[in-house]
Image (cartoon, rainbow, N blue to C red):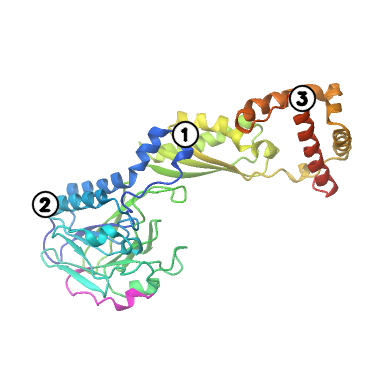
Amino acid sequence: MQGMAGDMIRIVHAADIHLDSPLRGLGRLGDEDLANRLRSATREAFDRLIEHCLATLPGALVLAGDLYDGDWKDYSTGVHLTSRMRDLHDAGIPVVMVQGNHDAESVISLSLTLPPNVTRLSTARPETARFADIGLAVHGQGFATRAVSTNLALAYPPPDRDLVNVGLLHTSVQGYAAHDPYAPCSLADLTGLGYDYVALGHVHARETLSAGPSAVAFSGNLQGRHPGEPGAKGALDVALRPGGEAEITFLPLDVARWSLLEIDVTGAEDEAAVVARVEAEVGRARESADTRPVVARVRLVGTSHLAGVLADTERVGYEIRPMAARHAVAVDKIRSEVTAPADRRVMPEAQRATLESVLGTALADPALLFADPELAADLAALVSEVNERYTRTVGLDLRDAQQLAELVAEAAQRLGAKADGGLL
């Protein structure tokens, strides 16, 4: 434990733990071992937070809301939390927490008996937890209901003289987050409190809103739970001195990492060049994650003559996913927003004439297409590929002349409509 008033005090700031919350979209990965690992990721990240505190003995652990994930009725979650809080108690580490919007609707949070080292600040009014032995005061107010629309920060007390003052608040700070506007306040409201540090929760992206003597920061959540929460996740280790500048250090505690990979394919000559560019980004994602599992979404952008080919992301995935797997990266989804060059978006007159001839033949009698020796080989290859990829899933067999004729006629009608509308 850290010592006398006026000395440097170190706290650990965490928020939005959502303990035992399931990660979403795991069924698409096709890797059951990885999916099972990810299902326990929020608990494992929480355990990493506790182990860091036990190893470094901060003056306090402060939790800025959403420790739970709503009305989560699995009491093993509460049992695990209580056990880990007791570990901190045995090590002499105090814990101060406020309820967030998810905690307010949690059955577990209302029924747990936590060890005496844990202080849950009032939901009725701002409250202060003082630790005179280390010179620390923590001020805060939790959520009594899920939707708190008032600016709680306006009622926070003035700082205690000669102590390090920390504010604790679950909030959406105006102008900084596209989140539900709970306990809305401005950055000026928070810096105006005169505290040495204000520890925020609710926003899952890590961000320091104000540095210097009155620092304000979101720690973000401990573990990304879906592709919308990419990048490194964890907690903040904060060193404080009364009236001094906060020294904030990020602690990566996540178990697995989501990554959004945007690859510009402009100038790529062929598909192999596209895959090579994707591989370079996959490699960087793998390196930045250390040994953590990585789940990536791939977004192809830019302008390329390959736009039509890349639009078939299912087929492109047959090349990208095995390549990524060799780097121990699982690809969740592939999306192409690649556009064709301007000079390729309008069909040349000669090609238009050929298309109109083919459409006319198809509409008159689709079977006649197979009589054209110039088309026969291409059609046979197409029939083989479609049967291989889709027959088992949709019951389609293009070797059936009637089914093929109907499909060709429908496709011809759609293409004809586009041609008439000037879309080709």
Q: Quadrant of the C terminus?
A: top right
Mark 3 neighbour class, 10 Å CA radius: few under 14, some 14 to 19, many 20 or more: few
Distance between mark 2 and mark 1 Cα atoms: 43 Å
What residue does disc 2 label? Answer: 90
What residue does disc 3 label? Answer: 378
Q: Give the structural element (helix, strand or loop) at label 1.
A: loop
Mark 1 neighbour class, 10 Å CA radius: few under 14, some 14 to 19, many 20 or more: few
Q: Is residue 406 magenta?
A: no
Instruction: Please give left or right for residue 27 compared with residue 248 in the image.
Output: right
Rendered residue at 28%/74% (across/down): 194
Instruction: Please give left or right for residue 63 compared with residue 298 in the image.
Output: left
Considering only order in the chain, which callout, 1 or 2, is on the residue closer to the N terminus? 1
Q: Which residues are magenta?
A: 150-165
Rendered residue at 36%/56% (across/down): 220
Looking at the rendering, which quadrant does residue 303 occupy? top right
Q: Say whether marks 3 and 1 touch (CB < 8 Å).
A: no
User: Looking at the image, is mark 2 or mark 1 nearer the viewer?
Assistant: 1
